[in-house]
Amino acid sequence: MALTDEQIEDFRDDIGDNGEPPAFSNTKLQRLFTRAGENYNQAVLKAIDQLLGNSWTFNDYTQNESQEKKQQIFENLRKLRAIWQAKVDEDAQASSSQIILTGMRTIPGRKKSRP
């Protein structure tokens, strides 16, 4: 199932991909969704993992009175990932606790002459 333009926009909002140019193309977001088995929360988690992979090399920069704390990006993404991981775990727990109805039939008793 392909994501609609509106869903892709929501996807971008959920991962904070609002920059110019965006970190992910529409095709890349679609591919992440497909790789996640069309599970939205899993797709967001995969996108955050990719952003984390790109941001761990950021360094803080200080010169005179100006500062850039780019390492905070990594820490903030880690916090965001923990939030989405909790949602994925919650979904997995909810889906595993569903009741499954099955048919029942009686098992015939054994005859003594045949084991």
Image: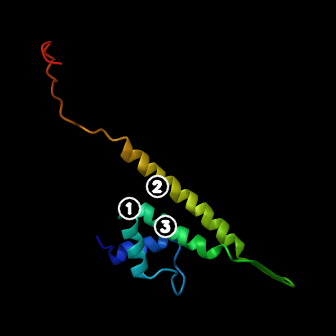
Kindly identify which residue carries mark 3: 46
Q: Which quarter of the rendering shows the C terminus?
A: top left
Q: CA distance from mark 1 to mark 3?
A: 11 Å
Quickly name the residue at label 2.
88
Query: Which residue lies at the image location 15% right of the left edge and 12% below the top edge?
Result: 112
Residue type marked 2: Val
Q: Which mark is residue 90?
A: none
Residue 11, percent from left and from top: 44, 71
N-term-proximal mark, 1 vs 2:
1
For the residues labelled 2 and 3, the Cα–Cα distance comes to 11 Å
Mark 1 Cα shell of 10 Å, populated few (<14), some (14-19), many (≥20): some
Report the amino acid beneath label 3.
Lys
Residue 39: which numbered mark, if any?
1
Identify the secondary structure beneath mark 3. Answer: helix
**Residue at point 64%, 66% (across, down):** 76
Residue 59 lies in quadrant: bottom right
Callout 1, which amino acid? Asn
Task: Confirm or deny contact between disc 1 and disc 3 (CB under 8 A).
Answer: no
Q: Earlier in the sequence, mark 1 or mark 3?
A: 1
How packed mark 2 is, by other alpha carbons closer than 10 Å (few <14, some 14-19, many 20 or more), is: some
Circle 1/circle 2 CB separation < 8 Å: yes
